[in-house]
Structures are given as structure tokens and as C-alpha cells.
Image: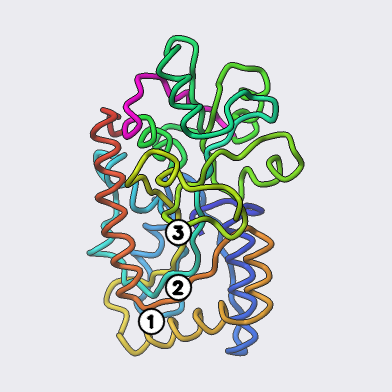
């Protein structure tokens, strides 16, 4: 697990692991290895025996990393064998509760009218949230900065204090403040309305046609893992996701469950690499 304990990925991963353990009668251990854009966990997986006993949680960050780093100590195509997708979650454009902006059109018009007094916010440069915000700015034809913050909490503070006027975050990361009335959702990033914010329109239907970003999770094994082993792991993970317990846990985490094949995960990854690379290139973000 290329993320620390207690976060969204860790909680969901432990739920999947527990269900797999119950099905197989074998213990499933979660080893958290955060840092370096998931490179530490990725290197550990790449060096593991291709026997199906070591697998790794992957996410959109794995598709962003090739464009954000000059070199990586691992390569998806060379070192990983996709098992399948597990979940998706969208991003939400939002403002503070008493903001005068109620629609995407309001936000765009204000940013164009007073570009020197309008700032967008997100968490750190190169994250999916940050790149989603940059894509919105570009597709809306705006010339305003996207201010990167250390944490989601800092983004919320920036909105409340007025240093930023609108922000982009994952729906799981922002829905608490939206539901309790501190923040107002303006639009979601997906092509269809999100089931957790059904009354909030998409960015695309709100005046920025073609806009779409989302985040995803999946599972991979070391390269050269036998196809029969990949197939068994895929069946175990899909079976776990289909259970009522995992469906409810994912809903609690504001994640949309998704099952599929190894080919499905590979397609998601390949398409995402191209999307994020274009955003990073157009924004002239220099790789680390």
C-alpha cells in the first residue's frame, strides 16, 4: 500500500483484505509503504516473487507519476501485471457557503472579470486534484492561478479566509463540509452526475463541454505472475467487492465500487496517463 495508515485507500484496502481472508482462509497483511509517489511500494512489488502472494493497491497517482518524475525506479508495463479495477471517485468544484458564486458560469465570469482578485485552490502540485483544477482553468479559458496547499484542511481554510475563491477536491475529501453546509458544491468532474451528490451538475453540462477527470483504484501483481494466478486473484477481488459488506463500506467512504478484468484496469491506466500528461505539459509543470 503506497499510502499511510488511516486514509481512504488504507481503510478500503483493509476491508478488501479482510474479505479475501475470509474467502481463502489465509491471512491478508496490509503493509503501508507511503512516500515518493508510491515508488517505495512499487519497487517492493517489482522485486517480489510473481506467485500471487504479494499484490499492490494502485491509483490515479500511478498514472500521473510517469509525467511528474524525470525517472522512476519501476515501469508499469515492465514490472506490473494488472489484476483489475476496484473503485472510482470523482472530483468536485466547490466554494464556501456564503460565496456569491452558485454555478460554473458564475465562477468563470468572476474569474474573467477580475483575474487579479480570483484564485483557485487545490492540494499539492501534481496531485489529481491539482491537475483537475488546472484542466478546468485551461478548458474554461481562464488566466488565474491555482494555489497549491499542503492539505485539504488548508484548502478549506483558504476558502473561508478568502485567499482562494473556489477549489477542487475529491468528493470523499469534501463531502463532509458540503453536507454540513460549510461549503457549496458547484459541479462534479464526471460525465454523469455523481450518486453521492445527485443534485449537483457536471462541469461539462454547466458550460465546459468535454471536461472530465476522475480518480480510480485497482490492484496489480508482479510482472510474469501466471495468468491462472491473475485470474484467481481477479475472481477473489471482484467477489469481495460484490459482497454487501464491501458495497456498504465503499459507500461509507464515498467510493463507487467497480469490478472488471485485468484488461479493464490496463485501459483505465493507459487512458489516464495520456490525460494527465497533456495537463502537465500544457501547465508547464517541471518533472521532479
Image location of residue 33, percent across then percent down: 51, 54
Residue that numbered label 2 is attached to: 54
Q: Tell which tag, 3 or 1, sits nearer the viewer.
A: 3
The quarter of the picture where residue 282 lies is top left
How far apart are the two marked residues, 1 and 2, measured between alpha carbons?
7 Å
How far apart are the two marked residues, 3 and 1, measured between alpha carbons?
25 Å
Q: Is residue 148 magenta?
A: yes
The span shown in magenta is: 138-151
Image location of residue 68, percent across then percent down: 31, 39
Residue sitting at x 52%, y 42%? 187
Residue sitting at x 36%, y 75%? 49
Residue sitting at x 46%, y 62%? 217
Image location of residue 17, percent across then percent down: 59, 74
Q: Is residue 259 left or right of residue 21?
A: left
Q: Is residue 238 left or right of residue 145?
A: right
Which callout, 2 or 3, points at the residue further toward the start of the chain? 2
- Cβ atoms at labels 1 and 2 below 8 Å apart: yes
In the foreground, 288 or 238: 238
Residue that numbered label 1 is attached to: 51
Neighbor class of circle 2 (other Cα within 10 Å; few <14, some 14-19, many 20+) is some
Residue sitting at x 64%, y 36%? 184
Residue that numbered label 3 is attached to: 216
Q: Secondary structure at mark 2?
A: loop
Instruction: Provide the major secondary structure of the magenta segment.
Output: loop
Q: Secondary structure at mark 1?
A: loop
Q: Is residue 50 left or right of residue 165?
A: left
In the foreground, 48 or 251: 251
Amino acid at each position: 500500500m503506497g499510502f499511510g495508515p488511516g486514509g481512504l485507500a488504507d481503510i478500503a484496502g483493509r476491508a478488501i483484505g479482510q474479505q479475501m481472508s475470509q474467502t481463502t482462509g489465509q491471512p491478508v497483511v496490509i503493509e503501508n509503504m507511503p512516500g515518493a509517489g508510491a515508488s517505495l511500494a512499487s519497487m517492493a512489488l517489482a522485486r517480489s516473487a510473481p506467485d500471487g502472494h504479494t499484490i499492490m493497491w494502485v491509483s490515479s497517482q500511478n498514472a500521473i507519476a510517469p509525467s511528474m518524475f524525470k525517472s522512476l525506479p519501476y515501469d508499469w508495463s515492465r514490472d506490473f501485471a494488472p489484476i483489475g479495477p476496484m473503485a472510482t471517485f470523482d472530483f468536485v468544484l466547490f466554494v464556501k457557503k456564503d460565496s456569491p458564486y452558485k454555478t460554473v458560469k458564475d465562477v468563470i465570469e468572476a474569474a474573467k472579470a477580475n483575474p487579479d482578485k480570483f484564485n483557485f485552490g487545490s492540494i499539492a502540485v501534481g496531485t489529481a486534484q491539482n491537475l483537475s483544477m488546472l484542466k478546468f482553468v485551461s478548458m474554461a479559458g481562464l488566466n488565474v492561478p491555482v494555489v497549491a496547499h499542503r492539505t485539504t484542511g488548508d484548502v478549506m481554510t483558504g476558502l473561508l479566509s478568502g485567499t482562494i475563491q473556489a477549489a477542487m477536491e475529491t468528493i470523499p475529501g469534501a463531502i463532509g463540509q458540503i453536507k454540513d453546509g460549510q461549503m457549496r458544491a458547484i459541479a462534479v468532474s464526471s460525465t454523469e452526475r455523481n450518486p453521492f451528490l445527485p443534485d449537483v451538475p457536471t462541469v461539462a453540462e454547466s458550460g465546459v463541454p468535454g471536461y472530465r477527470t476522475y480518480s480510480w483504484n485497482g490492484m496489480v501483481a508482479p510482472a510474469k505472475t501466471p495468468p491462472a494466478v491473475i485470474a484467481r486473484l481477479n475472481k477473489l477481488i471482484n467477489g469481495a467487492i460484490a459482497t454487501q459488506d464491501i458495497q456498504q463500506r465503499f459507500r461509507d467512504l464515498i467510493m463507487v465500487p467497480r469490478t472488471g478484468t485485468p484488461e479493464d484496469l490496463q485501459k483505465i491506466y493507459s487512458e489516464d496517463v495520456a490525460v494527465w500528461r497533456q495537463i502537465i505539459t500544457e501547465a508547464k509543470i517541471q518533472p521532479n
